[in-house]
Image (spheres, rainbow, N blue to C red):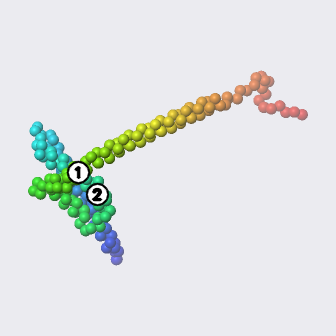
Amino acid sequence: MVVALPPLHAFMMIDKMLGYMLNRLLVLLLAYLYPAYECYKNIEKNKPDVEQLRFWCQYWIIIAVMTVWDPFGDAFVSWLPMYSEAKLAICIYLWSPKTQGTKYIYESFLRPYLSKHEPEIDRTISELKTRAGDSASLYFQRVVAYSQTRIVEIVQLVMAQTMQRPQPPQETQTATSTGSTGPKKTK
C-alpha cells in the first residue's frame, strides 16, 4: 500500500505559517505585554521612579509610531528574509536596559523631529478635531431628521391600517327569524 504524501510546498506553507504565528505571539508578549507590566509596576509604586516613567512613556511613543507605520513597511519590505524577526529584535532592543535603545532612538530621532514639527502637528490635530466634530454633528442631525421622518411614516401607516380595519359581517335579522339558513329557491 502506497501512501501519497502532500507536496513539499504544503509543508513549507505550514512551517511559514507556524513561524509567523510564533513570531506574532513573541511580539505581543515582548513588545506589548512585558512593557505594559513594567509600566504598571512603576505606576503602582508608592513613589514611582520618574526616570522609569519617562523611559516607558518614550518606549510607548516609539511603539505607537512603529505601529502606525507598520502596514506601510509591511507593504514594501516584508518580503525581506527575517523581516518579522527583525521587528521583534527592534522591540527587544528598545526596552533592554543594556542597549538603552528607547533613549537613543527617542533622543536622536523622534524628539528632534517632533519638536521641529510640533506647531504643524498641533494645528493639523486641531483641524481634524474640528472636522470630526462638524462631521459628527452633521451626521447626528441627519440621523435625527431621518428618524423623525420614519417615525411619522410608521405612525401614519399604523393609523391608516386601524381606520381601514374591516368590520366583521353581521347577519341580518330577517334571515335568522325565518329559520332559513340559505338562499331561497325560486320556481
In the image, farthest residue toward the right = 187
Q: Residue at x 22, y 53 (%)?
A: 113
- Residue 33 visible somewhere in the drawing: no
Badge 2 element: helix
- Report crowding for label 2: few under 14, some 14 to 19, many 20 or more residues within 10 A (C-alpha): some
Depth check: give the residue in front, 92 or 180. 92
Q: Total number of numbered labels?
A: 2
Identify the mark at residue 116; answer none if there is no mark: 1
Depth check: give the residue in front, 116 or 171. 116
Q: Nearer the viewer, mark 1 or mark 2?
A: 1
Point out residue 163 in the picture as x, y percentages from the top left corner.
64, 29
- Residue 117 visible somewhere in the drawing: yes
Question: For residue 70, which quarter of the picture?
Answer: bottom left
Point out residue 96 in the picture as x, y percentages from the top left corner.
13, 55
Amino acid at dot 1: Lys
Relative horizontal placement of residue 42, taking residue 11 as reference (left or right): left
Q: Quick one: quadrant of the C terminus?
A: top right
- Report crowding for label 1: few under 14, some 14 to 19, many 20 or more residues within 10 A (C-alpha): few
Residue labelled with disc 2: 70
Relative horizontal placement of residue 77, taking residue 151 as reference (left or right): left
The Cα–Cα distance between marks 1 and 2, rounded to whole angstroms, is 23 Å
Depth check: give the residue in front, 161 or 86. 86
Question: For residue 20, which quarter of the picture?
Answer: bottom left
Q: Residue at x 59, y 32 (%)?
A: 156
Q: Work out whether 162 lies above or below 110.
A: above
Depth check: give the residue in front, 83 or 177. 83
Point out residue 24 in the picture as x, y percentages from the top left corner.
25, 58
Q: Work out whether 159 lies above or below 122.
A: above
Amino acid at dot 2: Asp
